Image: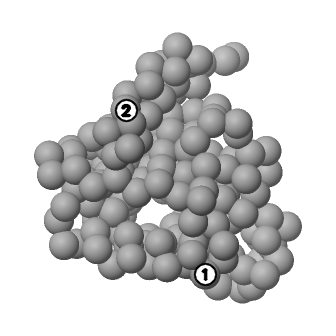
Amino acid sequence: MSFESRRIFKSLTTSQNLVRELLQMMLLGELLAPGRQRAWLVSPWISNVVLFDNRAGGFNIVNPEWGAREIRLIEVALQLMARGTLLGVATNLDEHNDAFIQGLTAAAREEGLSDKLLVVRRANLHIKGILLDRGLLMGSMNLTYRGLELNDETVTYDTGTRTIAETRLNFEAFAKAEA
C-alpha cells in the first residue's frame, strides 16, 4: 500500500514519538541519499533541538564522529551540507531564533560550508515546513522543544511530486527576495 499524504495529530498522550521518528527518517533518507534541490527548514521559531538519540550508537553508521550522545539540529544541518545539500533556513525576526541562526552560521563558516547555507529572516513569517527532496512535513509545529515534545500539533507528511514542487516554488521565493 502506498500513500502520498498522511496527517498526524500529536499531543502529550497520542502520537508523541511519531512526528519525531518521521522527522528522523526524513533526515536520514536525505543524509544517505542527498537530494538535488535545496532543503528547507521553515519555522517562525527554531531552536537547536535534539533530533537523534545516539547514546546507544544506533546512528554511528551515518556519522561515526557523532559518538554516543544526543545529536542536535545544527549538527544534522552541517552533515546535510557536508554531503552536498544546499540548505535554506527561513524564520522570523524574533530574538528567540538568534542563538540558532548565529550557531548554525558560525558552524557552517567554521566547516567551510557557508556557500551551502541560505538564511532568510522575515518579519511576518508564520509558515512551518520541512522540505527535502523526497518529502514535505508541514503543519502547526515549530522546530522547537515545545513544538516537538509538548504542544498539541497537527502535521501532514506529503510525498506527492506536485505538492513538493509547489512548496519548493514558494520556499525558493524566499531566496529570490533575499537576492
Return the residue nearer the eye: 158 or 20: 158
The residue at the far front in this view is 179
Q: Position of residue 171 (x, y in %)?
A: 40, 35
Is 69 left, or right, of 9 in this rendering?
Answer: right
Q: State the quadrant of the C terminus.
A: top left
| Label 2: element kind | helix
Q: Position of residue 2 (x, y in %)?
A: 66, 18
How packed mark 2 is, by other alpha carbons closer than 10 Å (few <14, some 14-19, many 20 or more), is few
Q: Are marks 2 and 1 in contact (CB under 8 Å)?
A: no
Q: Residue at image x 47%, y 72%?
A: 105
Mark 2 vs 1, N-terminal side: 1
Q: Give the amino acid at mark 2.
A: Ala
Mark 2 → mark 1, Cα distance in angstroms = 28 Å
The tag on residue 110 is 1
Q: Give the amino acid at mark 1.
A: Glu
Q: State the quadrant of the N terminus.
A: top right
Q: Which residue is mark 2?
A: 173
Is 22 left, or right, of 54 in this rendering?
Answer: left
Q: Residue at image x 34%, y 46%?
A: 178
Q: Residue at image x 22%, y 50%?
A: 122
Task: Name above or below for residue 152 compared with residue 56.
Answer: above
Residue 143 in sight from this viewpoint: yes
Q: Position of residue 98 (x, y in %)?
A: 29, 74
How packed mark 1 is, by other alpha carbons closer than 10 Å (few <14, some 14-19, many 20 or more), is few
Q: Residue at image x 58%, y 41%?
A: 38
